[in-house]
Amino acid sequence: MKLKSIVLGLSLIALPALAQTPVYLDVNKPIEERVEDALSRMTVQEKVAMTHAQSKFSSAGVPRLGIPENWMSDGPHGIRAEVLWDEWYGANWTNDSCIAFPALTALAATWNPDMSALYGKSIGEEARYRNKNVLLGPGVNIYRTPLNGRNFEYMGEDPYLASVLVVPYIREVQKNGVAACVKHYALNNQEIHRGYINVKVDDRALHEIYLPAFKAAVQQGGAWAIMGAYNQYKGEHCCHNQYLLNDILKRDWGFDGVVVSDWGGVHDTKQSIFNGLDMEFGSWTNGLNWGASNAYDNYYLAMPYLQLIREGAVGTSELDDKVRRILRLVFRTNMAKERHFGSFGTEAHALAGRKIAQEGIVLLQNNRNLLPIDVRQTKRILVVGENAVKHMTIGGGSSSLKVKYEVSPLEGIRARVGSSAEVIYAPGYASPAVAEQDVKGAKAEQKEIDPVALRNQAVEAAREADVVLFIGGLNKNDGQDSEGNDRASLSLPYEQDALIAQLAAANPNTAVVILSGNAVAMPWVREVPAIVEAWYSGTEAGHALASILFGDVNPSGKLPFTFPARLEDNSAHALGEYPGDSINVSYNESIFVGYRWADKQKKARPLFPFGHGLSYTTFAYGKPIADKKTLLPGETITFTLPVKNTGTREGQEIVQLYISDKKSSLPRPVKELKGFSKVHLAPGQEKTVTFTIDKEALSFFDDTKHEWVAEPGKFEALIGASATDIKGVVLFELKE
Ligand code: GLC
């Protein structure tokens, strides 16, 4: 009896202890309590293991405690196919073909936060379903030069536009229990010398141009991860940079997430320990002899770090801060209380991509209203150009995707036209074949190319067509829109300019569609009635483009960056250094990037300005008025104006608000974007567009005081349909 009562008693004591869920495992406990509890249970080895990669795209959890690994995935436009454990090649899984969403320049060109939210929700669901808890995107590096190979992954030249559009993407991704990892922080504005170039830029440009989108990502988007850039700033690699990471990102902005290095962006153990890095991925350390089993043990934050701790050379307080942040990431994602289950390769995601693409396509020119094409009056359509058939979701570096499908422009046009007209195709030009990226041992079979014959064949066919649709531009080959290198010129490659000119001469009804992530020169701009920038639109590219070309959808996109007429009209090439001397690159142009530079030029005019985009309908802007003439600090001022659809079909118009400081103690741009609103109007409908700003919108970064200041004095609010198409101006004053 006695024994039984003892056993019973013991079990009663043990029961609560056994039943007591450890705090870190209790999803109902506050995250910070879970973090501290988990941290207290971890050994130093387990903590160090968490701070560096264990494979190409994963880092260790704590198996003993049931804390899962962190799995990262590229990229900003879709969930990359599974990669081998320790090689860049695809693992040839058969269940990881994703939906490719439009490139982020296309998202930026929508000027629509709702599209950014739809984008983040959709890609977040794909990442969640593939069990990735960190999405390596979005990218928000500012478009400084049209030659940067990775501009297609970013959101244009204006910090305000990028700041507004990056936030919904992040928030919606993270609602899936997947961290957005905003990149590349910071000043990664070229690919040439990207791994080491030291960027020299003044504080005004740093704070006014290059940091705002990252600041918005952290403070408004609540980003859970940030990726350090490859380049250097103030002589330190951005992946372990005291000023950018500890001073600005973590101290000033209050970032409580994880700083992840770019792959191979780490170069020093002590700097990694003390300068704000939390997780090291893909470093080219001595351990990286391909496939070596202990490669990851040799990472800077691996054995070398553990060694320093064991020797007493460094303490563990920095390690605990790194691990707190990583545990916070885990409890926000893999071990979060409510975690969605995601979905993958769905029609809903494909249609979301199509909608974003349709809203991002920009009608640059439409003389004689050549577009949209009316198939009832068009019997013979000639499609010319390699980009009409080339798959653009593959290649271009780390954003390359293995997609469930991709509708090419030609397929989209053929599907849309059906039997109501004849659609003929002529390549017109050809680019060199490239080995398929991520496929081990892939070869590129160079086909015999006779450019003259290709061109002549297309020009001959053009003479017989009712309409010619030239679909060209750039592609994802090296030296085009691709990571790791930059373009060599502003011009279109593969002699497309000559072909376009000859097509236009052979048939006046020629429309040019450019697929690109960058501005291109257009020497034929006056010879071609219609020009469309269609970006890289992803899985549904062909259907999105066809819906615009044939008028099912009214184009409403506007340019997120300036198209200069000549490369030397761009400030990085007129005033700044590019690409630098391979050691340093100086951003001498300072804050005068994009339209901020173009506005100051007396002679050179942009080919197409920032914020430009046409519609198949027309809009009339009424006179803008302000609700006050003078603004006191702490107050807001509201501008309103009527906008009317004066055409015969529905459409969307992006109304832009620029602010001009009429007198300032430091040089300022003529004007700067401080508001925009995309408004949908039925034919004949008029709506009142409203902008409310406060003195923050009037401020500039005073690098002598090292703070943002709004100086009292006169300002103008300029309402425009683009940076050069100003419809109305309102004068107002900021008082002390
Ligand atoms: C690449 C890119 C980065 C990408 C990472 C992983 O070098 O710079 O954007 O997410 O490595 O592929």
Image (cartoon, rainbow, N blue to C red):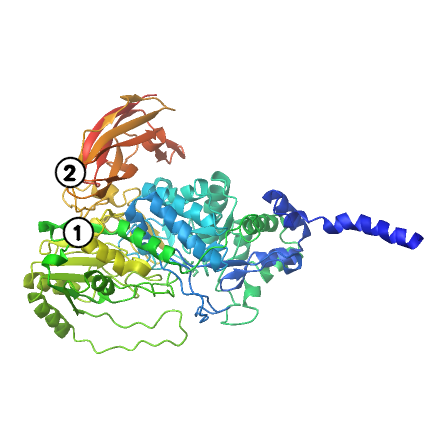
Q: Is residue 240 visible?
A: yes
Q: Residue at x 18, y 44 (%)?
A: 649
Pick the front one: 564 or 354 = 354
Q: Label 1 is placed on what type of residue? A: Ala
* Helix, strand or loop status at disc 2: loop
Q: Report the quarter where the C terminus lies.
A: top left
Q: Label 2 is placed on what type of residue? A: Thr
Q: What is the x, y in percent for residue 563?
A: 21, 50
Kindly indicate the quadrant of the structure image that contains residue 497.
bottom left
What residue is pinned by disc 1?
565
Q: What is the x, y in percent for residue 400?
A: 37, 63
Binning the other alpha carbons within 10 Å of mark 1 as few (below 14), some (14 to 19) or many (20 upward) gives many
* Helix, strand or loop status at disc 1: loop
2 or 1: tag closer to the N-terminus: 1
Q: Please say if 476 is above or below 655.
A: below
**CA separation in Å, label 2 and label 1:** 31 Å
Q: Is residue 202 visible?
A: no
What residue is pinned by disc 2?
646
Question: Given contact means CB atoms under 8 Å apart, are the residues at marks 2 and 1 in contact?
Answer: no
